[in-house]
Image: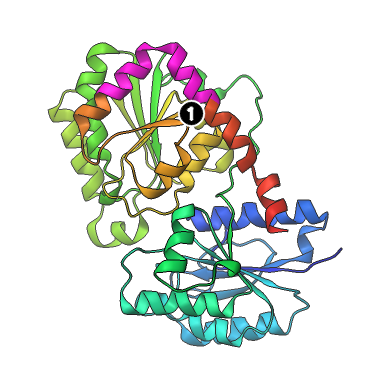
Amino acid sequence: FLMKLPYTPTYMPRACGLATFNANLKGAIEKNLQIESQSSFVVAINDADDIHQYDYGKEVKFVIRQQNQRDYIRAANSINNSLADACVLQHEFGIYGGDSGIYVLPMLYRIEKPLISILHTVLKEPSYLQKLIIQEIARQSSKVVVMAHKAVEFLTEIYGVPESKIMLIEHGVPDYSDELPNPVKEMPLFADKRVLLTFGLLSRNKGIETIIKALPQIVEQHPDVVYTIIGSTHPHIKKHQGEEYRDYLKLLAKSLGVSKHVNYINSFIAEDELINYLKATEVYITPYLNEAQITSGTLSYAIGAGAAVVSTPYWHAQELLADNRGKLFQFGDHQELANIVNELLSDDIELNLIRQNAYNFGLDLRYPKIGSRYV
């Protein structure tokens, strides 16, 4: 069974969660279909006017410049003129050009192939334009894929999308191997330490200050704790605000006397390296400041690696951490966070139970299985 598929919109080496997801999904589907990677291709979106902004692999056959409306039309023509059997499209509002990413619609209206659209964000309170865009994507699609039960609920009740058109497939995670030794555990910053970790593009809505405020109480009971923040500042934020948020976090840690317990890895690191950090982690923390997060790839990755996750109760966390796969604390409550982390680090039995529950659940999230569901 040979199926040729174009994938859009972002792709490696762009430092973007959707780009990583796109590459992993493409590989997982091809593995399940037992086809060569050359059988499919990518239509990639750049976030600048330079068509050579990223050094793409040969699988990228067409590049869209985010704010160039004509490129979207040309991309649709390119897909239609190919031997593609269907088109796989990821959607996130900030990826496409125009107000709320409306430039995606003229492209979708012109694509003549069956369309599978993967929605990474489904808003509970969309603007008129955001609601229209999601409704039109759903109308043009043969299937709409979401990654959480809450998203299915929102699509049917708020956007009026027929449930028969919606498919729930969890966010995929790498096919973690258990090779030893883990080089991260040998690094001076991590050797003989109890590691807390957060990763992802840095921005104020991530709530990392909540963890730093909790650190004095955690370190008092567990002086061998080190908290590592992996991720560069979100490019759009860096362009307008520079490293203001990272500098604030560093000053906060210094004022609380915990600077030597905080590491910053200011880059978008490769997935293989990230996996090693996750496997060296005892407690992974997602401290987002509000509930309106319908999908979190970082959370899925942490669960797949078998980390004990402590998180605020945003929508995706409520689902993934059910059945004792993690612990929840209230938004912005550093006192509750400190108490939960201290209890886990003091109770190896509970800590290991949560880690095992997460790891077992994550086995069904691995990309080969996720790819088979897309197939």
Q: How many dots with numbers?
A: 1
Drawn side of residue 308 relative to residue 331, left or right:
right
Q: Residue furthest left?
A: 255
Q: Which residue shows up at 29% across the image and 58% down it? A: 237
Q: Which residue shows up at 56% across the image and 42% down it? A: 271
* Span of residues in magenta: 339-356
Q: Where residue 160 sits in the image (x, y, percent)?
A: 45, 74
Q: Main secondary structure of the magenta part?
A: helix
Relative to 4, residue 69 above or below: below
Q: Where residue 110 sits in the image (x, y, percent)?
A: 60, 87
Residue 337 seen: yes
| Residue that label 1 marks | 307
Q: How is this picture coloured?
A: rainbow
Q: Which residue shows up at 56% across the image and 53% down it? A: 20
In the image, 55 versus 217, the foreground residue is: 217
Q: Which residue shows up at 51% across the image and 35% down it? A: 303
- Residue 346 on the magenta segment: yes
Relative to 274, residue 64 above or below: below
Residue 28 seen: no
| Quadrant of res 41 | bottom right
In the image, 151 versus 88, the foreground residue is: 151
Drawn side of residue 181 relative to residue 205, left or right:
right
In the image, 251 versus 19, the foreground residue is: 19
- Quarter of the N terminus within the rendering: bottom right
Assign a secondary structure to mark 1.
loop
* Three-letter amino acid code of the residue under disc 1: Ala
Relative to 188, residue 132 above or below: below
Q: Where residue 197 sits in the image (x, y, percent)?
A: 39, 31
Q: Sort mark 1 into few (<14), some (14-19) or many (20+) by Cα contacts within 10 Å.
A: many
Drawn side of residue 324 relative to residue 207, left or right:
right
- Residue 121 on the magenta segment: no
